[in-house]
Image (cartoon, rainbow, N blue to C red):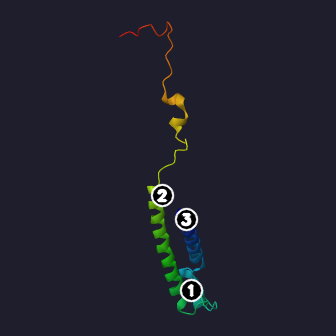
C-alpha cells in the first residue's frame, strides 16, 4: 500500500513539473501584441489558460493530499532497530572503564 502511494506521488510530482514548465509566463503574451504570431493556440485562443490552470490546480491538490497521506503512514510506522544508534553500537561510550588501582589514585586532593 505504501509503495503504491509513493509511485503515485512520484507520477503526480513529475506531471506537475511538466505542466508548470509547459505554461507560458505573464510576459509571454507581450510578443503577440506586437505581431509575434500564434501564442498559445494549441488549445484555442481562450481555452489554453483554463485547461492548464485547472489541471495544474488538480495536480497540486492531489500532490498535497498524497504528501499528507504519506506523512501519516510514515509517522505511524515503528522505527526498525537496525543498530544505527551511535550509543548502542559503541559500548565503550556507554560503559565506564574500570578504574586502575594505582598509587596515583590514592593521593588525596587537598581542600
* Number of residues whose C-alpha sits closer than 10 Å to that of mark 1, classed few (under 14), some (14–19) or many (20 or more): some
What is the CA distance from the residue labelled 1 to the residue labelled 2? 44 Å
- Give the quarter of the image for residue 8: bottom right
| Callout 1 touching callout 2 (CB < 8 Å) | no
Identify the secondary structure beneath mark 1.
Answer: helix
* Number of residues whose C-alpha sits closer than 10 Å to that of mark 3, classed few (under 14), some (14–19) or many (20 or more): some
* Outermost residue to the right: 37
What is the CA distance from the residue labelled 2 to the residue labelled 3? 11 Å
- Residue, disc 3: 6
Label whose residue precedes the other's in the sequence (2 or 3): 3
Label whose residue precedes the other's in the sequence (1 or 2): 1
Task: Indicate which disc residue 74 carries.
Answer: 2
- Residue, disc 1: 29
Which residue: 57% across, 67% down?
Answer: 7
Identify the secondary structure beneath mark 3.
Answer: helix
Label 1 vs label 3, nearer the camera: 3
Nearest the viewer among 8 and 35 is: 8
Label 1 vs label 2, nearer the camera: 2
Q: Position of residue 10 (x, y in %)?
A: 57, 68
Identify the secondary structure beneath mark 2.
Answer: helix
* Outermost residue to the left: 111
Amino acid at each position: 500500500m505504501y509503495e503504491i502511494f509513493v509511485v503515485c506521488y512520484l507520477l503526480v510530482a513529475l506531471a506537475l513539473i511538466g505542466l508548470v514548465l509547459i505554461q507560458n509566463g505573464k510576459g509571454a503574451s507581450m510578443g503577440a501584441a506586437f505581431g509575434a504570431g500564434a501564442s498559445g493556440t494549441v488549445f484555442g485562443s481562450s481555452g489554453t489558460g483554463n485547461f492548464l490552470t485547472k489541471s495544474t490546480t488538480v495536480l497540486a491538490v492531489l500532490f498535497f493530499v498524497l504528501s499528507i497521506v504519506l506523512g501519516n503512514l510514515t509517522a505511524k510506522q515503528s522505527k526498525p532497530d537496525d543498530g544505527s544508534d551511535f550509543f548502542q553500537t559503541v559500548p565503550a561510550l556507554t560503559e565506564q572503564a574500570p578504574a586502575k588501582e594505582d598509587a596515583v589514585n590514592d593521593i588525596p586532593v587537598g581542600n
